[in-house]
């Protein structure tokens, strides 16, 4: 054996020994992490049991017996791998389980006398919506609620910072409110919860008016808020959502009229608001990365089947990362539209008509024009002339921001919210029968959104971007409670089934190579659902007849928290059997 051979042989032996050491170290690290999580979970459960507004576990109502339904039997194919715990990990490294919340929906203390006011103030004062009131009083009881999160085995928590609370009057900063948000972030970390912080979740200070996102200087004003909030919390938070559901803000405010200011059918205003929101996100991304270079920043859309109402916004933000020049953007967007629809199931006739209509009025993209001939200006002028006689100015502010940014793409991960993405599902005939009565509006109630776990896989795949992880930032199911009475869903769907079915679909997506990196269930406890307390999404129910007492079960009397906990713990241990119907 030559000296070179001896050297190589020694190197091989050293590498093998090092490999054994690394495997042993990895195993020890995994065991240590499991033990740490178990200890945190147990301590949080003990604290939660002693809280005065949370019923202790020994008083937990026995959940009703659940039959295995055909829905569970139709679970995606990968769940058939369920069996005994396996040494092969199911989840990717660094995967997070959490729950998602929003400041205005849970904190309480907005829009009343002497309280900070946001853009929902006028609707509450006019009686157009139910007052938000105390919500679930998260502002004053965040520690006990974070104990509930940790007790489920979660290692992440999404919460929002309310601009209206921090800056109730222009230029007047409530430093005490900022300090409280810092305390919430610290409390998360003390419980082993990684904070995911949202800087804008449908609300802004009332002094900005209801039409804030139509103002040309909205992105600059929002940037100042981001600088203040991120600058204060950067020592405790590294994961950020700049703006929640840009598509819902623009549609809800100016297309469907379900959010302030409540106008309907104003296509040009939808386009203008979306343009300013995208520009604001890009500027916010730049600011956060200047303050915190290692940050993870995203914006999340809710999944919608119509390309222009969802994926187009993200594609515009991502265009430069694909090497698309500004001159070629229209043509590329048209190609992306076709690719999007090719990923989705075949549409119904009404869905086809909506797709054609949205494509016709899209401010970006081409239909019958040849490459290089942009229809942008022609289309937006036509739409503006039809819907806005006042000729509201419209600019390509978002596109300017994309091509002038120092960052090739203003996204560190893709964030999606998955409920019922099919647009035509949300329209019903007035007088439609629903849980607890009839609906006299043409919009389907949230507690009728159908379950479609296979669709979660489809939309995860369709929303992937090269070299970017994908986080499911919201996913949840609604039931109805009215005047203290809980009504079962007409389809008999239960939250325990929903959680299991959708997490099975998520595992299928991971098995298929889709880079899912986190899952956040919407939501922790029943909260204020944008004008009403009747929709109930909480893993924990809230007894509003007795104030804000948190129930040991969900609103339907089921142990949804126990189901989520068992699945989280099982998947971390490599046990697919937790995804089987019980």
Image (spheres, rainbow, N blue to C red):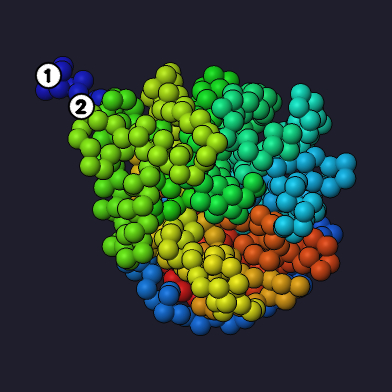
Q: Quadrant of residue 509?
A: bottom left
Numbered marks: total: 2
Relative to residue 472, is residue 323 drawn left or right?
left
Residue at image location 74% in from the left, 34% down from the top: 207
Give the mark nearer the N terminus: 2 vs 1.
1
The reply to whether residue 400 is in sight is: yes
Disc 1 is placed on an element classified as loop
> Residue 174, relative to residue 347: is it above or below?
above
Residue at image location 59% in from the left, 25% down from the top: 217
Relative to residue 143, is residue 556 drawn left or right?
left
How dense is the environment of label 2, judged by Cα within 10 Å: few (below 14), some, or many (20 and up)? few
Disc 2 is placed on an element classified as helix
The reply to whether residue 143 is in sight is: no
Relative to residue 190, is residue 99 drawn left or right?
left
> Residue 432, relative to residue 119: is it above or below?
below
Q: Position of residue 43 (x, y in %)?
A: 71, 52
Q: Nearer the viewer, residue 4 or 105?
A: 105
Residue farthest to the left, as pictured: 1
Q: Tell me the tag on residue 211.
A: none
For label 2, the residue is 9
Q: Position of residue 574 (x, y in %)?
A: 43, 57
For label 1, the residue is 2
> Residue 359, relative to residue 544: is it above or below?
above
Q: Nearer the viewer, residue 202 or 438?
A: 438
Residue at image location 15% in from the left, 22% down from the top: 5
> Residue 333, relative to residue 83: is it above or below?
above
Relative to residue 131, is residue 87 drawn left or right?
left
Q: Position of residue 250 (x, y in %)?
A: 53, 44
How dense is the environment of label 1, judged by Cα within 10 Å: few (below 14), some, or many (20 and up)? few
Residue at image location 84% in from the left, 67% down from the top: 546
């Amino acid at each position: 054996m030559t000296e070179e051979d001896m050297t190589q042989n020694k190197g091989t032996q050293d590498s093998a020994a090092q490999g054994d050491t690394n495997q042993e170290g990895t195993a020890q690290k995994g065991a240590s992490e499991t033990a740490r999580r178990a200890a945190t979970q147990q301590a949080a459960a003990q604290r939660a049991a002693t809280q005065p507004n949370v019923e202790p576990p020994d008083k937990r109502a026995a959940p009703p017996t659940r039959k295995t339904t055909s829905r569970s039997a139709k679970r995606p194919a990968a769940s058939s791998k369920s069996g005994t715990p396996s040494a092969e990990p199911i989840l990717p490294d660094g995967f997070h389980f959490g729950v998602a919340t929003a400041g205005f929906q849970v904190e309480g203390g907005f829009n009343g006398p002497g309280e900070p006011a946001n853009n929902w103030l006028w609707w509450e004062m006019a009686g157009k919506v139910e007052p938000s009131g105390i919500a679930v009083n998260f502002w004053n009881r965040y520690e006990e609620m974070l104990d509930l999160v940790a007790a489920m085995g979660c290692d992440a928590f999404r919460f929002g910072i309310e601009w209206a609370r921090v800056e109730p009057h222009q230029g007047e900063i409530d430093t005490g409110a900022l300090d409280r948000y810092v305390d919430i972030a610290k409390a998360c970390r003390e419980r082993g919860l990684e904070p995911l912080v949202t800087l804008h979740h449908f609300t802004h200070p009332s002094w900005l008016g209801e039409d804030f996102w139509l103002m040309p200087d909205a992105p600059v004003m929002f940037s100042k808020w981001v600088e203040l909030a991120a600058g204060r919390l950067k020592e405790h938070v590294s994961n950020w959502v700049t703006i929640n559901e840009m598509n819902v803000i623009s549609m809800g405010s100016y297309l469907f009229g379900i959010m302030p200011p409540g106008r309907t059918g104003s296509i040009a205003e939808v386009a203008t608001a979306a343009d300013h929101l995208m520009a604001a996100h890009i500027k916010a991304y730049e600011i956060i990365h200047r303050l915190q270079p290692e940050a993870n920043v995203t914006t999340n859309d809710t999944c919608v089947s119509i390309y222009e109402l969802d994926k187009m916004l993200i594609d515009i933000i991502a265009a430069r990362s694909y090497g698309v020049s500004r001159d070629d953007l229209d043509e590329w967007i048209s190609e992306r539209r076709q690719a999007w629809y090719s990923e989705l199931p075949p549409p119904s006739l009404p869905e086809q008509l909506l797709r054609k209509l949205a494509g016709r009025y899209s401010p970006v993209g081409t239909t019958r024009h040849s490459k290089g001939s942009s229809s942008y200006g022609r289309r937006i002028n036509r739409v503006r002339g039809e819907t806005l006689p006042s000729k509201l100015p419209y600019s390509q502010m978002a596109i300017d921001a994309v091509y002038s940014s120092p960052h090739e793409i203003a996204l560190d991960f893709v964030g999606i919210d998955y409920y019922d993405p099919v647009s035509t599902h949300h329209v019903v005939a007035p007088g439609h029968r629903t849980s607890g009565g009839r609906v006299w509006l043409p919009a389907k109630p949230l507690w009728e959104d159908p379950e479609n776990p296979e669709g979660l896989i489809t939309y995860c795949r369709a929303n992937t971007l090269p070299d970017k992880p994908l986080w499911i930032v919201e996913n949840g199911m609604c039931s109805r409670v009215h005047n203290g009475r809980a009504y079962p869903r007409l389809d008999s769907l239960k939250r325990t089934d929903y959680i299991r079915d959708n997490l099975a679909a998520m595992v299928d997506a991971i098995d298929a190579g889709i880079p899912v990196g986190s899952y956040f269930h919407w939501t922790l406890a029943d909260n204020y659902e944008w004008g009403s307390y009747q929709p109930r999404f909480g893993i924990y129910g809230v007894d509003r007849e007795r104030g804000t007492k948190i129930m040991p079960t969900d609103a339907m009397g089921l142990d949804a928290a126990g189901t989520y906990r068992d699945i989280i713990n099982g998947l971390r241990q490599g046990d697919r059997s937790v995804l089987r119907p019980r």
